[in-house]
């Protein structure tokens, strides 16, 4: 019985450490634009971020455009409205 408390404490400390370590990766995960979009949306292949901001005024308008008129390369996004809205907010649409 005495051995269980230190083992439990070590387990909890490991969980806390892992959660803080993954929290630092959360900042990187918020950079969806740079990981998923920027390589094509470079103003040569597809409109860049500033052009999209000028064209779409709201995240909802952007979402509808992606779902209905997005290029087939964007099929991975078309069924994930929450991801599209996160990207819209990340590029500055409200």
Image (spheres, helix red, strand yellow):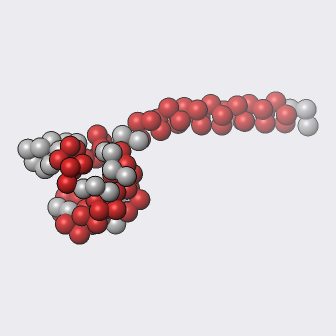
Return the residue found at the far left: 44
Say above or below: 77 vs 48.
below
Residue under the point 19% across and 66% down: 69
Say left or right for 93 vs 9: left
Q: Nearer the viewer, residue 74 or 48?
A: 48
Say left or right for 79 vs 71: right
Q: Can residue 41 be seen in this view?
A: no
The x and y percentages for residue 63 are: 31, 62
Return the residue found at the far right: 1
The x and y percentages for residue 16 are: 66, 34
Quadrant in the rendering for residue 7: top right
Quadrant in the rendering for residue 90: top left
The x and y percentages for residue 34 are: 28, 40
Question: The N terminus is located in which quarter?
Answer: top right
The x and y percentages for residue 92 are: 33, 45
**Number of numbered discs overlaid on the protein picture:** 0
Q: Which of 29 and 3 is in front in this view?
A: 29
Q: Nearer the viewer, residue 14 or 74?
A: 74
Residue under the point 47% across and 38% down: 26
Q: Can residue 54 be seen in this view?
A: yes
Say above or below: 79 vs 57.
below
Residue under the point 28% across and 55% down: 57
Return the residue found at the far bottom: 68
Residue under the point 41% across and 41% down: 29
């Amino acid at each position: 019985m005495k051995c269980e408390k230190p083992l439990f404490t070590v387990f909890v400390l490991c969980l806390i450490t892992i959660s803080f370590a993954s929290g630092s990766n959360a900042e990187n995960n918020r950079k969806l634009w740079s990981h998923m979009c920027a390589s094509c949306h470079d103003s040569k292949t597809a409109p860049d971020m500033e052009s999209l901001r000028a064209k779409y005024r709201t995240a909802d308008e952007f979402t509808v455009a992606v779902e209905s008129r997005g290029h087939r390369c964007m099929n991975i996004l078309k069924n994930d409205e929450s991801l599209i809205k996160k990207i819209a907010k990340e590029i500055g649409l409200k």
